[in-house]
Image (spheres, grey):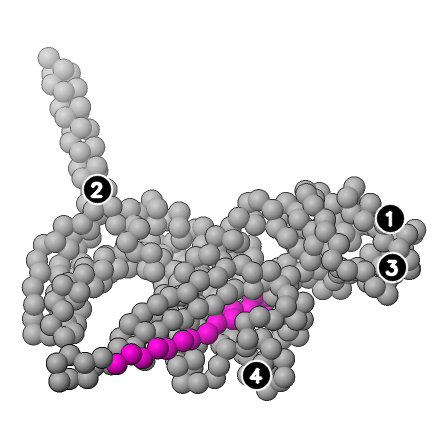
Amino acid sequence: MNDMKRLVFGIFVLGLSLVFSFCTVYAQDKVRAVGMATIHKSAVDIARDKAIENAQRNAVEEKVGVMITSFSEVENFQVKMDQILSESKGFINTYTIISEGRDGDTYKVTIEADVGTGRLKDRMEAIALIMARKSKPRLMLLFSEQTQKDAIAEAAMAKYLMSQGFKFVDAGALKKTKGFERLQSLNADRKEISETARRYGAEVIILAKVEVTTKSFKMGDIEVSANEVIVSGKVVNGDTGEIIATDSKTRKGDIKVTVEDAARDLAKEMKEQILERWSSELTNMATVKLVVFGLKSYRDLSRFKDLLTSEIKGLKQMHQRSFAKGEVELDIEVKGNAQSLADDVATITLDKRRVTILEITPNRIEAKIVP
């Protein structure tokens, strides 16, 4: 009988501990956070929405902070934090408003949010892996004009993208050349963009422009002005001249604030498109530009292309872009990346002449056939 009591008691304790464990795990995903927003021109409803968004961001920030420090990655804390916070809504399963109300010119909301830590962890690891495998390509940001509005937009986009871990190349030297004027038109050809990128050490170029339209109208005896801002741009692979992403954002309001908001939103959207493209390249096919010098004849070229077809692992397609004076330019679609392609190209011999790799960037390889 005593053995039976001990068995029942043991089962009870085990069950109770499991319940407490479950509750603890569940409670760990519940975060209470406060969000605030300034009320402009008596627009309480807009301020309330922004306060809720701010509270959601703060809830995710708290959870990400715990996760990052628990992984002992404190040195990359801010970069990873910013990467996640731009998508904070996507990690909130549900939330409950505990309290809300106006306090002077501020609207304050307290929420209890259920944060999906599993998705957070997956996203953190995915972003870190993509950036690492792409060797953190360097960006160059160029606006079509050099006015105050362009400077504001450039600063906002650069600040956001740098917070995401992107490295920037200073375009100051380029802006002093005639080539900058052609790039400013946003219509430069692929070859020109690629040559500019290589010259200044950028793997990615963002070409952008800001358009501001001001309309005036009367409300009774009062004349009112309304500003519409459009910030648009395209992201170009500096190695190949290929367009990676393109988008635009439109906002209305005070010019400085509106330009900053539109530029930041455009940078966020472009970042997502860039990451999506890089992720696809890493898991599917990547296009790498292969430039080879030292071919003696068209016959050499034909034999070299045959060797590429037989020796390159994961090669899907090969497109010849140009051939002149012993130099060929090929676009190679391959399963893998530029480094793995370069490793295979370096093993090729053409009539006892070997291939020497001269330069590798994330999407471009330069090589020379030597005796």
Q: Is residue 56 left or right of residue 108?
A: right
Magenta residues span: 202-216
The answer to the question of whether label 2 and label 3 lie on touching residues, with beta carbons closer than 8 A, is no
The answer to the question of whether label 3 and label 4 lie on touching residues, with beta carbons closer than 8 A, is no
Q: Is residue 134 inside the magenta stretch?
A: no
Which one is earlier in the sequence, the residue at label 2 or at label 3? 2
Which one is earlier in the sequence, the residue at label 3 or at label 4? 4
Q: Which mark is residue 303?
A: 1
Q: Please rate how many residues cluster around mark 2, counting C-alpha atoms within 10 Å: few if below 14, some from 14 to 19, many from 20.
A: few
- Distance between mark 1 and mark 2 Cα atoms: 64 Å
Which one is earlier in the sequence, the residue at label 4 or at label 2? 2
Which one is earlier in the sequence, the residue at label 3 or at label 1? 3
Disc 4 element: helix
Q: Please rate how many residues cluster around mark 4, counting C-alpha atoms within 10 Å: few if below 14, some from 14 to 19, many from 20.
A: some
Identified by mark 4, the residue type is: Lys
Residue that mark 3 sits on:
295
Q: Which mark is residue 26?
A: 2
